[in-house]
Amino acid sequence: MELRHLRYFVAVAEELHFRRAAEQLHVAQPAVSEQIRKLEAELGVTLLNRTHRDVSLTVAGAALLEEARVVLRQADVAVQAARTAQQGQLGRLHVGYLADSLPASIPRALARFRIAAPGIEVLLRAGPASRLAKDVSDGTLDLAILCLPAPVGDLRVTGLGTETAVVALPATDRLAAYPSVSPRQIGERQLVLLPRAHNPGFHDGVVAAWRTAGLMPAYLDTAQADIGHAQLAVASGAGVAVLPASSAERVAVPGVRIVPLQGGPTCEIAIVSRPQASTRVAGFIALAERLAHAETKRQSLAVAA
């Protein structure tokens, strides 16, 4: 089977007219008819119903159409990759992420991706979940790492694991010596949270966890989506911060201790991308997914031990 056969078939299937398909392909109509006959003969099925008045797809033709489109798109990507590689530049990968919720597997995936594809320039941008999802849909970003639920619409979602929560407490607080704490132990102390607009899934999860425990504390949203800023608020006596575990553990502020939160919110960390991703996007997602699952397995074994 040749790509030319598929291109001719897709043109006819979309136009449902041999003459218009030939005009689109800039070839003579008999050539289109001949290539379709060769494709049907090779496959051993009838792809198109033909009459003097119209052309329609058979069941087999409709099934082939979707797959043929995918094959042709991937062929175009491969051609473009070869051409850009000839020029020494494989392109760019635009990655969006939530600054407050980024699993450790992502930095490792970025490092390995850079080694595996040195010709691809990786550009990173942090932002709120809603904007990141919109930028992926619009094509401004190739992919984004988000905390679900988020407004992902028709984007493809690849799960990376579960994000848990931690509590940032003043080091002098009696609870800071505990191996973990619960919402009931914290009670109705004022909670310091990152802005809801930045990561609504996690923010709403915190509120729900306290309400489930029958508590109604006051909430203080920080002025900016910054883990260090939230911990500084704790150090200054503003309250107790509830933060995503993955990022809070990367920032140390003197006078503040990070303690796991039992019975707190959890959310799924996922990569969102457009349904028809390029080879470089698909390659990064596969790498990130593999490393995330390996990290989850490592943590499970550590707990069991």
Image (spheres, rainbow, N blue to C red):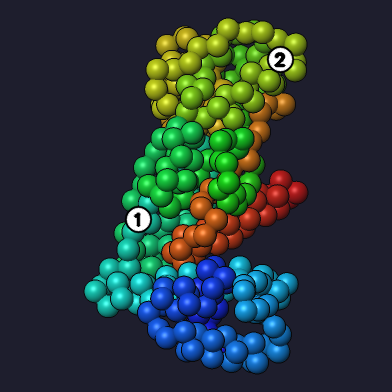
Q: Residue at point 49% right, 40% down? A: 133
Q: Quadrant of residue 235?
A: top left
Quadrant of the snapshot with the N terminus? bottom right
Callout 2: helix, strand or loop? Answer: helix
According to the picture, the residue beneath numbered tag 2 turns out to be 211
Residue located 52% across and 30% down the image: 199
Depicted 151 relative to depicted 142: above or below: above
**Residues at discs 1 and 2 in contact (Cβ within 8 Å):** no
Does residue 226 lie above or below 151 as drawn?
Answer: above
Q: Quadrant of residue 54?
A: bottom right
Residue in the picture at 59% in, 30% down? 201
Let me know if residue 194 appears in the view: no
Mark 1 → mark 2, Cα distance in angstroms: 41 Å
The disc at residue 49 is none
Provide residue 176's location: percent of width, then percent of height: 59, 20
Q: Secondary structure at mark 1?
A: strand
| Residue positioned 75% across, 17% down in the render | 212
**Residue 34 in view of the camera:** yes
Residue 37's x, y, as percent?
A: 60, 89
Q: Pointer 1: what residue? A: 122
Where residue 259 appears, x then y in whole percent?
Answer: 59, 27
Relative placement, left or right, of 81 versus 298 is: left
Q: Quadrant of residue 163?
A: top right
The three-letter amino acid code for the residue at tag 2 is Arg
Q: Where does the image place residue 16, in percent across and percent down from the top left?
A: 57, 70
Q: Earlier in the sequence, mark 1 or mark 2?
A: 1
Q: Is residue 193 above or below residue 199?
A: above
What residue type is disc 1 on? Val
